[in-house]
Amino acid sequence: MTFIKISEAAKKLGVSSRRLQQMCKEGEIDGAVKEGRLWKIPENTVLPEKRESIKSSLPLPLPVGVSSYVEAVTNYYYVDKTLLIRDFIDTLPKVSLFTRPRRFGKTLNMDMLRVFFEKSDRDTSVYFQDKAIWRCGEHYRAFQGRYPVIYLSFKDVKYSNWEDARKDISECLASEFARHAELADSSKCNAREKTYYQSIVSGTPDGVDLSRSLSMLSSMLHKHYGEAAVIIVDEYDTPIQQGHLNGYYQEVVDFIRNLFSGAFKDNSDLAYGFLTGILRVAKESIFSGMNNLKVQTIMEPRFSSYFGFTKDEVAELLAYYGKSEKLNEVCEWYDGYRFGNSDIFNPWSVINYVDEGCVPKAFWQSTGSNEIIGEIAAAATPEITENLRRLMQGETVTTYIDTDVIYPRVTENPASIYSFLLITGYLKNAEIVPQADGNFMCRVEIPNKEITFVYSKEILSKVVPIQSQSTAVKIQQAIFERDFKKLQSAIEEFIVQTISHLDGSNEGFYHGLMLGLCSAVNNAYRLKSNREAGFGRFDIELLPLFPDLPGFIIELKATREKSVDLEKLADEALEQIKDKQYSLEMQEAGVKEIHCIGIAFRGKEVCIKSE
């Protein structure tokens, strides 16, 4: 580091030497050193007020992984969702359940509601005075800071046994009781209530007392503050899902039914209740008799724009960071969801995309647990398996969507996989027809490029046998290197290891085999099968998702006859591609380099010809 004298620095910075020397003494000049009686400071020193000015002119950081509302609005770029509060106040449902896919802003919104409604020793209105809700008028402001609030999150209650899950739920409740320490010696609460309070905080309640905890806490808060309580439970269904997967479903359902019944059903100490989750668990299993519950699924128009980003919000965010030219790319990758009447972008992926330099990739994959989907997929019928393949190829599937779910019955109807995929964010509803039973007939499809990549890894691989990792790597390398000898070797290796001579009975068998193998490259290609093109229907097409990649048309032939020359059969497949002009679709899409591949099979023998 280069240092300069005080006199030289003072002249450069436009302040007096005496002032600069005093700033050094007070530690306001970063990197300043004292040699004897003289100060030296770094040549590139910037005055503190200048540093603050530079800092304030820099764009705010993006809230990657931030779920605290106060932290988000204080230190980060915040997409204003406070009109959710306005729309809630306009309708005032007693208990609201919001179901949305993971990473769509549920926790941040629930914390926003907590900060808005909760009574506090400090003025929390400052966190809303520059937000849309404050501009709505005094009627809405009157709700701010008005109620005691109970806030619970079950998002981390993920255990393999009920004993540990119950212990963690007990800890969550104890922490929330302790947050309301004013109740420990409240003159408004009686001795029995205070004894109960201490038993919860100390973690020593029995099962009955624990299941009554939300009811008792809301009662004590109502007495202490003279206002009924707001109760918020975030990710309520996490322990239920874990119970189903790990064999303690009935225990967790019985407990949560009693816990929620005391909190939300006929509770005179409840002002309003809010719950969030990914799935709606059917009323008869958890919300029995709760006639005051209003469920807001992704199919409902009310509140539809408040979970996830709208196109206008994404455009504004990109403009703020000087990336407006990236809007089309963001639309291709992260748009496509349809919640109620709103077109929605995945907020987690948009934020990560901008934060990581606007390089598109599948940020959403592996951000949650998909064991339930895997369980349903394992029971998929051949028809469902084929439909899941068709979805991967960019087609739509019309299906019945049931928004009520009871976990133990999910495998009884394999068609429920479409409902799960829609609710959990792997599909979008392209068209909805409401049914008399309250459910829907929907035309569903994959929403965007990101989910195209995620879909094969997390969904299709669970219903279609996928090759070993080593074979997958070889196939990827062969395709990207245009090395068709290596491709033939990889296919032969897979066939020898996995099928018998009896398996290779017809072209349809090999077609399914090749679809599974080609899924190895679905992070760079859209896989299509049996689609019309030119003057016929090709077997398989690999349409590149990036402009610098080649396209591939694959035609398959199969025979049982030993007298048939496989090389000639592969040549016939290759000629069919050219004669039928299967590559016309790719040419019209602007693909400049197209490879035609003819593959002939007999038992475990393979021959590939390319052009």
Image: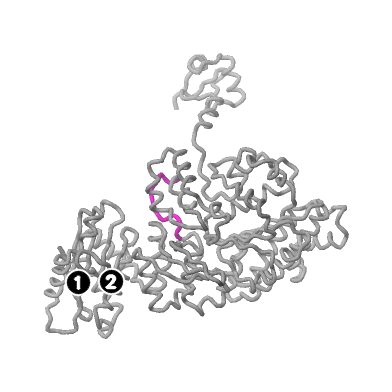
**Residue 351 x/y as whole percent:** 47, 48
Q: Circles 2 and 1: CB distance less than 8 Å?
A: yes
Residue 463 placement: quadrant? bottom left
Name the residue: 52% across, 32% down.
55
* Residue 371 visible, this orientation: no
- What mark, if any, has residue 599 been given in the picture? 1
- Magenta segment: 355-365
Count of picture labels:
2
Q: Is residue 95 magenta?
A: no
Q: Amino acid at mark 2?
A: Met
- N-term mark: 2 or 1: 2
Q: Relative to residue 178, is residue 46 depicted above or below?
A: above
Structural distance between the alpha carbons of marks 2 and 1: 10 Å
Name the residue: 27% across, 74% down.
511
SS category of the residue bearing label 2: helix
Coloring scheme used: one colour
Majority SS type along the magenta span: loop
Check disc 2: other Cα within 10 Å, few if <14, some if 14-19, many if 20+. some
Q: Is residue 357 magenta?
A: yes
* Residue 310 visible, this orientation: yes
**Residue 109 x/y as whole percent:** 60, 52
Residue 524 placement: quadrant? bottom left
Residue named by callout 2: 514
**Residue 4 x/y as whole percent:** 47, 19
